Amino acid sequence: MNSTQKADSIFSEISAVITNINQHIDLNNCDREPIHTPNLIQPHGVLLAVSADEYRILQVSLNTAQFLGIEPQELLERPLQKLLGEEQVRAIEGRLAKNFDNINPLPIEIEKNRGTLYFNGIVHRNGKIVIVELEPRQFEKVRDFFSFYELVKTPIDKLRNTNTLEELCDTIVGEVKTITDFDRVMVYRFDTEGAGTVIAEAANDELQPYLGLHYPATDIPKQAKYLFTLKSLRLIPDVAYEPVGITPELNPLTNERLDMKMTVLRSVSPFHIEYLNNMGVGATLVVSLVKNKQLWGLISCHHNTPKKVTYETRTICEFIGQIASFELIAKEHNQDLDYKMKLKSIQSQFIEAISAAKDLQQSLTENSQCLLDLVGADGVALCFGKYVTLLGNTPNQEFIIKLLPWLEAQFYDEDVIYETNYLSKLYPDADEHKATASGLLALFISREQKIFIIWFRPEVLQTVNWAGNPNQSVERDKNGTLLLSPRTSFSLWKETVLGKSLPWQLCEVEAASELRSCIISIVLRKAEELTQVNLELARSNTELDAFAYIASHDLKEPLRGIYNYSSFLLEDYREILDSSGVDKLNTLMSLTCRMEDLINSLLNYSRLGRAELQMRPVDFNLLLSDVLDTIKASARDTQVEFRIPRSLPTVICDRTRISELFTNLISNGIKYNQKQEKIIEIGYLDSEDPIAIAKMQKYRQKTPAKTIFYVRDNGIGIRKKHIECIFRIFKRLHGQKKYGGGTGAGLTIAKKIVERHGGEIWLESVYQEGTTFYFTCN
């Protein structure tokens, strides 16, 4: 193949690659453009891809003849040692064993007939491939560490002596412009949506200022932002360059295009080249500013004409970018320090207030102003399950309830906080409420109980200064397809933004997050305290049960003695005693009987707390039939109508204890009833019954539905003031002998039986009309 044929072949390869790259970049694929595998390089250096095991040259850029005097095809499959020599290849191997950031550049010398060629070698390894990039070096000797230190000491000292973020950024652009001599140097900061703003600028006087201008997120696609987090410096010395291809197109080892994300010479997206041309830029140097492993912004240098930048200068700029990235954390922390201290003070007072409160929801409501000031909000909604409390300037309750399912879906995995200052864009129904809810900051306290704190901010009309109309980057082709096209104008373009609130500051979001941690800590502490109280109560109850059993058992013997001796006195000395003495002995015997009844009730109650329940499926229809047979036998002279509206279910329970429960409740319904026609109704509620619905709402979310049984009578009823004490042991609301007497322990025992079954008992009563006892049984 002669030289003309070789040139034609090389030109064909370059044309094929460029044609492949220059496809339409539309709205759907711009963020997916494979900018890390262009198979093209910028022409100011040479690229070699070699195998990591044998250092055999697998791919080369098509400009090797220009820089090395060797045609690309002659280099392929040759050992790298043939080109660089054994010593320099061993140096590359040694450097690759170290940290990538510290190994480059590597001084490379290639001996040719016409003399020695000097290069900066930039090497890195990517899996099975080692990539070697060679850039011509202007000086024969590489500067040592001390020379580098002298160059960076002054700018670094200036950066560290700044006090605010604004001072830091102004110092960055000034020092970088001095070092690089670019026409314009800017600090470009990204917002949460990926759009950028020029927050500092140092430019030649004749240039139109870009300070304060905004740039849409589409100006720098997502994958480009990602690459800036991997490699912190990007140089384009000549925007009008002709890209150089790589041969062969696929790497022989991987059978894929070469991954060039860490290369220095990687060619630039044609979309970005057109963008720079439209800006009138001839050369660019960009350095990443990374905070907490996230791309915070860029140091962007523009020159109107092509401009070479030595590797040494690039290294200085890269180092300044790294120091600036560290300084960002401290400067942003000091930003608005007075406001942050105010938030901390509010937070301390607020946490102290809710820590002392017994009820979280009530304490949040009572300290509503602190709750609003904590994040600088105008309104807040407290959502505890289905219950919503609105404080301050908020949308109506109907909107909040409708918003909650959407809001809950915004929390992924372990997310506990969500914020936006443009709610209507994400949730269109909020557009009607933008006067109160353009901004939203939501705190997820409990997923299980669905507890939210949602703060709101009103709409604030804003004017944004764009660098050209951001909407002009979207055009349609003849088929109607939306295409991204770089803007041709970067002049000031003002936009009035509607529906947005002031953005939530990081310190406000952090204050909300810390509030959640404090609330959870308080809840856990109270739960621990409650656990301790419950343990103490359980211990006390156990001891009390044991004491009641022992005491009541031991009291029976002296009581029997008192009763027996009183009986003996009446039998043996009745003729001697007068009527008053006989009455007193009869009263004494009656009191001992009464005392024995009380002791028996106490014994029964204490046994109930200690005895193990015999749990098994019990048909309530059969159980109730036996209970009613017993009651009917003992109340033959009483006219009672028993109503059972429908068949009762089968329940797992202790049959003996539940029989005792029904016996107590039904007997009371008969006993405390003065009506001629006594009616007792036994049944259970449907799940749709209002009483059942109201009761279930009081339980925690996801609690299984409970069957609610009832015993209803048409008796004398209970006054409202007595309802709270009705289950207290030995508590009678009537005289000792009225309504057949009794110890007053029946309802206490009934309550204990229900609680032993994991249920709850309560009542509703209308005085002189009747009473209904409800109970559940787990």
Image (spheres, grey):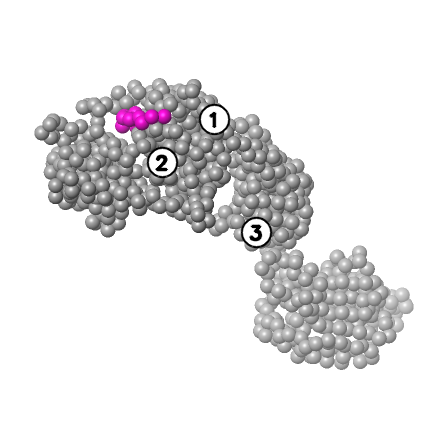
Query: How many angstroms separate mark 2 from mark 3 (CA)?
Result: 42 Å
Residue identifier under label 3: 406
Residue type highlighted by circle 2: Ile
Quadrant position of residue 737: bottom right
* Numbered disc 3: secondary structure: helix
> Which amino acid, mark 3?
Trp
Dot label at residue 39:
none
Circle 1 SS class: loop
Q: Which residue is mark 1?
A: 211
Q: Which residue is mark 2?
A: 273
Residue at 25% across / 38% down in the picture?
Answer: 244
Q: Nearer the viewer, residue 175 or 506?
A: 175
The mark lying in front, picked from 2 and 1, is 2
Sequence order check, earlier mark of 2 and 1: 1
Front tag of 2 and 3: 2
C-alpha separation, residue under disc 3 versus residue under disc 1 = 39 Å
